[in-house]
Image (cartoon, rainbow, N blue to C red):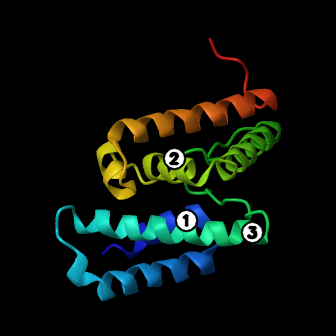
């Protein structure tokens, strides 16, 4: 029931299928082992997301020590190319998608978690706040900062033009 959503989150956070599968298994193992600690104050999905985000943070910290994270693969998500336009436009769109993926990878762990939960998992700020155990205002600010950081870096690279 929850495995696909947890996998989706984990995959976007760690950028690797096998590692995401391992994290999903660990999430459900920990949820089972710690079932007595679940007080039911939030939805069960919120609890699972929280465990998943924590495991992803742990994984990323460990991986960061080893070296740079692989590129994200967001082919089936909002900014993927579905157009039937010319080759030149497709190449430009692919470049933009690649740059956006790189900028998402360059976010801090917390910014990346908020960005992915809001943008790709389409969760409400309140739900993200529960998952990350932060105030709603903090989540909104973090999401805004993530967007600003991505936009600014894309502008500096000339990928997008200055907006009014």
Tell me which label, 1 or 3, sits earlier in the chain: 1
Label 1 vs label 3: CA separation? 13 Å
- The answer to whether 44 appears left or right of 13 in the picture is left
Q: Is mark 3 on a helix, strand or loop?
A: helix
**Residue sitting at x 39%, y 87%:** 29
Describe the element under mark 1 as helix, strand or loop: helix
Q: How far apart are marks 3 and 2 (CA)?
A: 23 Å
Q: Which mark is residue 88?
A: none
User: Which badge, 1 or 2, comes first in the chain's sequence?
Assistant: 1
The residue indicated by pointer 3 is 65
The residue labelled by disc 2 is 115
Q: Can residue 137 be seen in this view?
A: yes
Q: How far across and how far down the image is residue 134, in percent?
A: 37, 48
Task: Please state which of residues 125 and 64 is positioned toward the viewer in this rendering.
Answer: 64
Task: Look at discs 3 and 2 and give the one toward the viewer.
Answer: 3
Q: Position of residue 136 (x, y in %)?
A: 33, 40
Q: Determine the residue positioned at 42% across, 78% down.
A: 27
Mark 2 neighbour density, 10 Å: few (under 14) some (14–19) many (20 or more): many
Q: Which of 124 and 92 is in front in this view?
A: 124
- Residue 57's disc is 1
Looking at the image, is mark 1 or mark 2 nearer the viewer? 1
Q: What element carries label 2?
A: helix
- Is residue 58 or residue 81 the one in the foreground? 58
């Amino acid at each position: 029931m929850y495995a696909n959503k947890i996998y989706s989150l984990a995959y976007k956070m760690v950028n690797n299928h096998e590692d995401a599968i391992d994290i999903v298994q660990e999430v459900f193992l920990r949820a089972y082992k710690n079932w007595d600690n679940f007080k039911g104050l939030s939805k069960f999905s919120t609890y699972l997301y929280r465990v998943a985000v924590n495991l992803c943070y742990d994984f990323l910290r460990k991986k960061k020590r080893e070296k740079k994270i692989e590129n994200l693969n967001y082919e089936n998500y909002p900014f993927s190319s579905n157009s039937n336009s010319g080759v030149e436009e497709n190449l430009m769109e692919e470049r933009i998608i690649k740059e956006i993926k790189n900028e998402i990878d360059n976010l801090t762990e917390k910014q990346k978690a908020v960005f992915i939960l809001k943008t790709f998992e389409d969760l409400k700020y309140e739900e993200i706040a529960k998952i990350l155990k932060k105030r709603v205002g903090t989540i909104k600010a973090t999401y805004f900062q993530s967007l600003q950081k991505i936009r600014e870096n894309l502008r500096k690279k000339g990928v997008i033009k200055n907006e009014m």
